[in-house]
Amino acid sequence: MSNVISGGSLFPPIQDPIQRPSQTPASPSQEEGFSDILKKAINQVEGMHTTAQQQAGALLQGDRSDVHNVMIAVEKADIAFQLMMQVRNKIVNAYQEVSKLQF
């Protein structure tokens, strides 16, 4: 009788969670700041919202017969918006905590 756990056939090897990528850091001109990343994320959410609106409009006009894809697009846009709002709330909370600090 073989030991399945020690054989490693069921579970992949555990990777070090603190392991850093072996890539060299980007130069400052190529580095994105927090505001750039946040703007890109907001633009992606806005793009999802626009796509969902267009698909829903096309469905209402009778141009599309695929209700499933329209509903998936609407749900993706809704979940992305909810995530964006939670990130905003965390940023506001962090700002309030930092503003309470006395230097």
Image (cartoon, grey):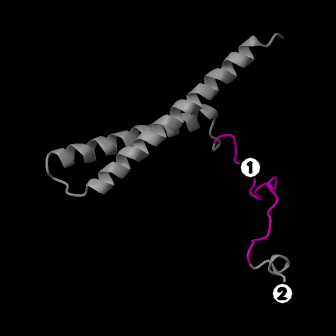
Where, by quadrant of the figure, is residue 7 drawn?
Answer: bottom right
Q: Secondary structure at mark 2?
A: loop
Residue farthest along the left direction in this orientation: 62
Q: Give the CA separation, mark 2 to mark 1.
A: 46 Å
Amino acid at dot 2: Ser
Q: Is residue 85 above or below residue 79?
A: above
Would residue 84 be found to the left or right of residue 64 on screen? right
Where is residue 64 drawn, in percent x and y?
Answer: 20, 54
Check residue 25 in the rendering and tell me which mark sits there, or answer none. Answer: 1
Above or below, 30 relative to 38 = below
Residue 74 image offset from top left, x and y in percent = 36, 44
| Precedes in sequence: disc 2 or disc 1 | 2
- Residue 102 is one of the magenta-drawn residues: no
Report helix, strand or loop for mark 1. Answer: loop
- Out of 25 and 14, give the one closest to the viewer: 14
- x then y, percent, for residue 51: 33, 45
Residue type (three-letter) at the residue carrying disc 1: Pro
Neighbour tally class for label 1: few under 14, some 14-19, many 20 plus, Cα within 10 Å: few
Which residue is found at the position 39% from the left and 42% from the top? 47
- Stretch in magenta: 10-29
Q: Nearer the viewer, residue 78 or 26?
A: 78
Could you say which disc has been placed on residue 2 in the image? 2
Q: Residue 97's x, y, as percent?
A: 72, 18
